[in-house]
Image (cartoon, grey):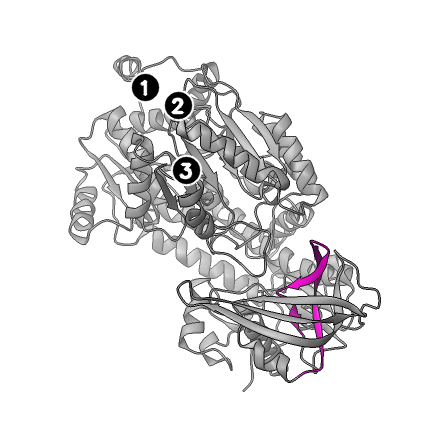
Amino acid sequence: MTITLDTPVEQIKGIGPSYADILRRRDMATAGDLLLHFPETYLDLSKIEGSPLPGREGLYAFTVGRIRVSRNFKKRSSLLTAQGEIGGRPVTLVFFNQPYLLETLRQKDLACVYGRIEAREGKWQLVNPLLVPEDQAGGILPRYRPLASLKAGTLRKIIAGMLASWQDERETLPDMAMRRHRFPGQTAALRAIHQPQTLDREHIEKMKERFIYCEFLFFQLELQFIRDRFRERRRVHRYRFRDDLRQDIDRLLPFRLSEEQVAAFSEIVNDLGSPQTMQRLLQGEVGSGKTIVAFLALLLARANGHQGAFLAPTEILARQHYRNACSFFGSDGIALLTGGCEPRARKEIRARLAQGEISLVFGTHALIGESIVFKNLALVVIDEQHRFGVAQRAALFFKSRAADLLVTTATPIPRTMLLALYNDLSVSTLKKPLSGRLPVTTRIIAAADRAAFYRRLKAELERGRKGYVILPLIEKSEQYPDLRSLQEEAAEGKTRWPGISQAAISGKSTPEQKERALKLFSKGSVRLLLATTVVEVGIDVPDATFMVIENADRYGLAQLHQLRGRVGRGIEKSHCFLIESPRPTQSGKLRLRAVAANQDGFALAEMDLELRGGGVIAGLEQAGELDFRLADIKKDYRLLQEAQTDARRLLQNRELQNSHVKKFLAALAAKIKNLSFS
């Protein structure tokens, strides 16, 4: 069968209905999508290591000796050990939950294994090494990140089969970009990435740049195309900022606004009085009070008889903002609309929005659905802008004849990156935390001191303290044996902290499970919340006084700062503990030292860009968190800038556009037209 970019994954050899479902849930619907799942790393199987040493990773010739398998049926686990020799030195191979390798090893006197030798109590061992088939020895083996039950080896076979049947020489990039950046053709680049003949990492990275640039280019085409359409919209909704509204604000606020908050709100009021619709980004330091500024903008819309919509990236955040809004505005005329709403409640909210009975609605992506119609939508607030695509932003914007748009982020953005990512928006900035907030003490904990640290933490928990433990993984991964998982830590926590009430949440938890756990944690019925990065933004529990981040060196500076911002929100002194991985990288150590020494989120954002730190390893916690499949806006910032320039040239000069770009822009124009509910 001939394979092209557009071949549905269901038609690819080796992909049945269950695998196709796994891929489609990760936005991999075609062969072209799947081929962008690049190898995580490559194993050099071209030479056998002649001098085995602890800590050295490589290909080894293993003389097979005694083999044993032990099983724990209660825990559904197994342990396979193979005694033997490497270079005349006794070595043990250890395989967790791979009993099927027993027969393979029994048939061999000599096996090729790839892994890292570890010295444990004077004895050498390899844990979960790769058993290399004879037909793969001597070459370069790509290693892929597993996708749920779709294992790395299966992915390797499927992708190799696709490339063997590949018949598609189309180019997505226009000739102008190919010539300017000297990019190779798409097919040549894909083969160099998935099937390198030699382990030339610099060349492989250059091949990947072609696809990273492509991702940025079409992002910038979308951003700039929609920005131009936004700017064509003249003001329809009129606002008056009357004295009685000033009195309402003074009455509703339990505190005085900071100077920065006053300045930001004044900029919003000025925008709402201008001839053009508002397009503003409100970025704020952790705890700087950006949400109350957004609420004041919604209050202004409501006081002028308009409707407002507040879009949050997660149901947890949407519910929290809704509860806070009910306290601030009163619950009349306010609604919450999320994917978890019951059908009857959803139908009622839709009807009341269309009739104008609901003045303010808070929700998630459910607000973007075509069935949601507003009577008089005037102001759209989108929280955590970086988690929404440009088209999602446009979808809610065009549910009005000309809505004003306020987008917010609690992740400070470096000035230069603002120009590339958000050049369509005016910017207001809140740099100072609200008065009364105490700085959070931050300490780095070495992996070797982890057990002693947790014994001390147990004593604090027994004194009534409350806090978080953040894990990078939901489930244990064979690919990342050094990374801690929520599943194993939740199990260990029952024996580590007996008598301490605990709860665990992740991206896989249902909205009801998250809501219940957070409610119990907020009330104090749960004192230890184990979580992935789902609590990174927006969670406000004032009496939580400690934050523990496992494998902290694997996170970017901005993400560490955001996680730290979940504590220090009350009157008690708070602490953040950054636990290193057993083998932290030098850049990981630099990030931890930077966070420990610095409380300024804007300074850390600039450092993050400079260090090119990225975030926690893509896809480890859950799929779908990142805006880009391949690109990292920090690490690949140079390509982002080049794509921004090229996108402007393509939009200004239609003769430079190829058929793929023209088709993309035509579809975007049609989408915008269809999204207009005026």
Q: Position of residue 448 (x, y in %)?
A: 63, 41
Q: Are marks 3 and 2 in contact (CB under 8 Å)?
A: no
For disc 1, the marked residue is 241
Check disc 1 and report its element: helix, strand or loop. Answer: loop
Q: Position of residue 158 (x, y in %)?
A: 56, 77
For disc 3, the marked residue is 383
Read off the magenta span: 108-131
Q: Say left or right for 653 vs 491.
A: right
Tell me the CA gap for discs 1 and 3. 24 Å
- Quadrant in the picture for residue 2: bottom right
Q: Are marks 1 and 3 in contact (CB under 8 Å)?
A: no
Q: Position of residue 115 (x, y in %)?
A: 69, 64
* Residue found at the far bottom of this picture: 1
Q: Is residue 118 magenta?
A: yes
Seen at 45% across and 49% down, the residue is 486
Seen at 68% across and 62% down, the residue is 125
Amino acid type for the residue under numbered disc 2: Val
Q: Are marks 1 and 2 in contact (CB under 8 Å)?
A: yes
Seen at 25% across and 48% down, the residue is 373
For disc 2, the marked residue is 269
Residue 323 seen in this snapshot: yes
Viewer-nearest of discs 1 and 3: 3
Q: Is residue 342 magenta?
A: no
Check disc 3 and report its element: helix, strand or loop. Answer: loop
Amino acid type for the residue under numbered disc 3: Asp
- Closer to the N terminus: mark 1 or mark 3? 1
Check disc 2 and report its element: helix, strand or loop. Answer: helix
Eyeballing the image, is 333 above or below 337?
Answer: above
